[in-house]
Amino acid sequence: MREKDSMNRRTFLQLSGFAGIAGFTGFASAVPERESGSSVELLVGTSATTERPHTVVTPYLPNGTRIVHENDTLGYVAVEFPEQSSSQVYTALKQASMEQGPVSYVEPNGTHRALYEPNDPLYSNQNIHQMINTPAAWDETLGDSDVTIAVIDQGVAYGHPDLQGNARSDPGHDFVDDDSDPAPDTSDESHGSHIAGIAAAGVDNGTGIAGIGNSTLLSVRALDEMGSGAISDIADGIQWAADQGADVINLSLGGGGPSQTMDQALAYAVDNGALPIAAAGGSASSEVAYPAANSKCLAVSALDSDRTLASYSNYGEAIELAAPGTNVLSTVPGSDYEVRSGTSMAASVVSGVAGLTLSQWDLTNSELRAHLKDTTVNVGIPEDEQGSGLVDAGNAVTTPP
């Protein structure tokens, strides 16, 4: 699958394959300087012995290799050689390590790196990012404005300082009042703004919280000031969002029971390339709420910070993923922030991860759905509570599909 190179945030070599890096200098003996160019390094460990590591390893080294680093205390050396010799050298040393002799292991001298941390001042108050490994994803990408997340809800307060940078220039549509202003009618209509902030509040913008990624937000108002919405408005909103090119459609709503009209709207969205992501419901029921129960939706349950099913979360066979849903800090109308809990929040976390994943990989909606599930972390609770597991942004972004 092709990687989106333009949004890659790597500044160091990957910890995979054979990669030459500058060595750790502690407890090091004097060795030749490393050569620049296409050289490769392996770390070779030695068994407990009174001999120096380089004395142990040298007899096993093919021509053209040299020791560039040695640590007597830990008993290893770094061996450098031309890239074209990598197979020969690795085979020779690996064979030596399998003979129960003085060579105990062979491994690439790869790299680790500091995990990215955004400059958003409320980032340290957010419990979701460490739980879903977002910093590892941010090492690669902070998101892409070419990826659109539609929020079908009470409307999004685009004027919030943490949302305005990721708001779509053509803001959306209000299916409740049938106009082109999808903002909440009152500040009490805050559910949609909270959902939007979780998925795509500005990351690294020096303001408030950090969303999952810098995707573009498309507001579709289909719920009124009481948080209720007619099936027709929601279905029309889904269809409209798909027509606008939404990549992800967040549905933090439900409870009205199956509907053929909604089924048609969801099928239309999927046929037009969108991935609907829906909240499982918050009545602690063993039945997943509709529309999350529809097979066209990716159904999300909510976990507490201890990675167990939240007491309020619905569960059942339809659950495909789990995400943090308890005590989630996000944006509300004005310039404020609030902590809220619910499967609504969990669904938005997954929508944000989906958007971040699309900023790194070119995937169809079905490929995206499978990739999100394939890169989860099993948290040890029943499958009907977590599906394939806890969504992991770092895995989703760094693991090739």
Image (cartoon, rainbow, N blue to C red):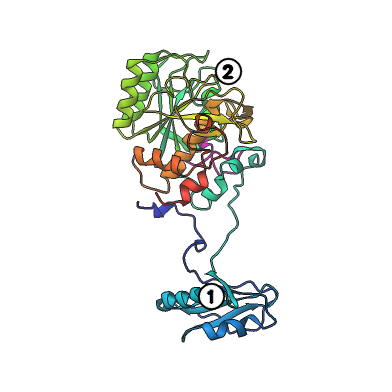
Query: Which residue appears at 32% of the width and 16% of the height?
Result: 260
Q: Foreground: 317 or 255?
A: 317
> Is residue 164 in view?
no
Viewer-nearest of labels 1 and 2? 1
- Contact (CB < 8 A) between labels 1 and 2? no
On residue 245, the disc is: none
Q: Position of residue 9 (x, y in %)?
A: 49, 55
Q: In the rendered structure, does residue 200 fall within the stretch colored magenta?
A: yes
Q: Secondary structure at mark 1?
A: loop
Q: Secondary structure at mark 2?
A: loop
Q: Please name the predominant secondary structure of the magenta segment in the image.
A: loop
Using a 10 Å C-alpha cutoff, classify the residue at mark 1 as few (fewer than 14 neighbours), some (14 to 19) or many (20 or more): few
Q: Position of residue 78 (x, y in %)?
A: 57, 76
Check the image and name the residue furthest to the front. Answer: 100
Q: Position of residue 278 (x, y in %)?
A: 45, 27
Q: CA distance from mark 1 to mark 2?
A: 71 Å
Using the image, determine if residue 40 lies above or below residue 58: above
Among the 4 quarters of the image, the one containing residue 112: bottom right
Q: How many marks?
A: 2
Using the image, determine if residue 64 lies above or below residue 367: below
Query: Which residue appears at 46% of the width and 43% of the height?
Result: 356
- Pointer 2 residue: 188
**Chain part drawn in magenta:** 199-215
The amino acid pointed to by label 1 is Glu
> Is residue 79 in view?
yes
Using a 10 Å C-alpha cutoff, classify the residue at mark 2 as few (fewer than 14 neighbours), some (14 to 19) or many (20 or more): few
- Pointer 1 residue: 99
Q: Foreground: 217 or 126?
A: 126
Query: Which residue appears at 60% of the width and 57% of the height?
Result: 114
